[in-house]
Amino acid sequence: MHEDNGILGKARKREKLENPARVAELKPEETLRQIGVRPGQTLCDIGAGSGLFSLAAARLGVRTVWALDTDDAILEDLRSRAAAVPNLQNRLGRWRFLSSCAPVRRLGPAGDCTP
């Protein structure tokens, strides 16, 4: 296992986060459908990591996906993978960024966003 100062490199992080057993257990697209994510919505994936759920949301037709993370290496990896996905916006996440991009909303009981 290659580690740099105790921190996994980009490739190893993606390998760990997208391990086939983990993906099979999490079922990203199915999970997003179950919580009411629909085409045309905007989704903010906080702690996006390798983009497992961000990319799944984009495939489901979510209008805009904000993929936020505080890890430069994994976010750069996601940026390169998401270059061909026009509805995926990725940012190096800092919590104050959230308040600058949109009002915080909560997900209502039917999956609707309410102020």
Image: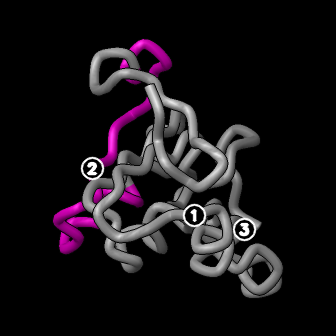
Q: Which mark is residue 89?
A: 2
Say above or below: 105 vs 84: above
Magenta range is: 77-98
Closer to viewer: mark 1 or mark 2: 1
Position of residue 98 measured from the top left corner of the image (x, y, whole percent): 40, 23
**Kind of residue sitting beneath label 2:** Gln
Could you tell me which residue is drawn at 51 percent across and 39 percent down?
A: 69
**Kind of residue sitting beneath label 1:** Gly
**Kind of residue sitting beneath label 3:** Lys
Say above or below: 19 vs 88: below
For marks 3 and 1, the one nearer the N-term is 3
Q: Which mark is residue 16?
A: 3
Q: Secondary structure at mark 3?
A: helix
Q: Residues within 10 Å of mark 3 (few under 14, many from 20)?
A: few
Q: To which quarter of the image does residue 92 belong?
A: top left
- The reply to whether residue 11 is in sight is no
For marks 3 and 2, the one nearer the N-term is 3
Q: Secondary structure at mark 2?
A: strand
